[in-house]
Each structure stands twice: as structure tokens, then as C-alpha cells.
Image: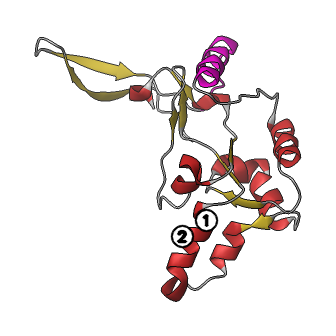
Amino acid sequence: MTAIPEERISDQPQQNGASEETLVEWSFSAPASATRIDRAARALGAAGFEVEILDNIAAARARVRALIPDGASVLTGASETLRLAGIDEDLNTSGRYDSLKLRAWSMDRATQMAQIRKLISNPDIVVGSVSAVTEEGSLVVVSASGSQLPAFAGGARRAIFVVGSQKIVTGLIES
């Protein structure tokens, strides 16, 4: 993602009705500091998420494979993070897992759309990424089609999110 040095977000109304111009520095390519990573991890933990901080993409790729049992039904959300890390390929083409994405792609959208929606809404495991993680412990998910949202929101037995530290932001307005 290309970083935009400074972008005008909006005029935020003050409580007294006046407005204050808010500028946010956008830099989604630089890794977050250890302090920001720790703050976000603690907030996510307090919200009930199990957080693992890994050193690099290779470690994340190996950890995801280790977390998913052979034969599990897996749905991968569309994600540049998963694609670039090789995780999407591992999960969808290794033959080790039941790839719901591949099964859904092989179905006829005109006649089997209801079955496709049911199939991808209830995997054993959904693996994806997020657009942002706030230091307050919120995950921000944006989806072009919305197809992975039911699984992310609780349809899957387990959700695994692979997120680079560059996606950590202070709060929702920055996301």
C-alpha cells in the first residue's frame, strides 16, 4: 500500500458547535513500534482475543499451518497479506485442508448461490486479515463482497487473523 504523508480527514465538530480541522498522518507501510504493538496486543487480549506476536512472515506462515488440523474446512478471506505470505496458497492448494473457497468457486452461482452462502458462512476455520487494528483493541474489516464477514463474525468455529504491525492505528478515526 502506498503511504500518503498527510491527508485532510474532516472538520470535526467540537462539543460547543465549533469545528477543528483534523489532520492525520497516514503511514501504512512502516512497522509499528514495540510500544504500539504491546498496547494493541494487551487491548485485544482484554477483549478476549488470543494474540501471538511473531517475528516475520515465515513464522506466521508456519504458525497458521500448525494451528489448523489436517482435513479441517477452511475459508480464506481475500487478503493481500495472506497472498504475499504464501498462506492463501498453503491453505487452498496443498490438499491438506478442505478449501471452501475452491469448493465455492466450483459451484454454479446462478443455481447454487444459497448453498454457496451456507458453505462459506460456517467453516471450521476462517483465516484472513484486517484493514486495521486499533490500540484500543478494535479490529476493522472492510470487504468488497462481504463474503467472509459471516465467518469472521462467529460463523466459523475459529478465526485466525494474520496482521502486519503496519496496520496498527491509534483509534477508529485513523483506520
Quadrant of res 148: bottom right
The Cα atoms of the two marked residues, 2 and 1, are separated by 6 Å
Tell whether position 87 is magenta: no
Direction from residue 149 to residue 54 in the image, left or right: right
Residue 89: image x %, image y %? 79, 60
Quadrant into which the C terminus falls: top left
Residue at image coords 81%, 39%: 60
Q: How is the image coloured?
A: secondary structure
Residue at image coords 62%, 28%: 48
Residue at image coords 54%, 24%: 137
* Residue 120: mark: 1
Residue 53: image x %, image y %? 76, 26
For the record, the magenta segment spans: 29-46
Residue 82: image x %, image y %? 71, 50
Of residues 30 and 36, the one drawn nearer to the viewer in this rendering: 36
Evaluate whether residue 6 shows in this view: no
Direction from residue 87 to residue 149 in the image, left or right: left
Provide the secondary structure element on which disc 1 rests: helix
* Residue 117: mark: 2
Of residues 126 and 25, the one drawn nearer to the viewer in this rendering: 126
- Residues at badges 2 and 1 in contact (C-beta under 8 Å)? yes
Of residues 166 and 128, the one drawn nearer to the viewer in this rendering: 128
Quadrant into which the N terminus falls: top right
Residue at image coords 83%, 44%: 67
Evaluate whether residue 122 shows in this view: yes
* Residue 129: mark: none
Q: Residues within 10 Å of mark 2 (few under 14, many from 20)?
A: some
Q: Residues within 10 Å of mark 1 (few under 14, many from 20)?
A: many
Amino acid carrying mark 1 in the image: Ile
Amino acid carrying mark 2 in the image: Arg
**Vertical comparison of 16 with 51: above or below:** above
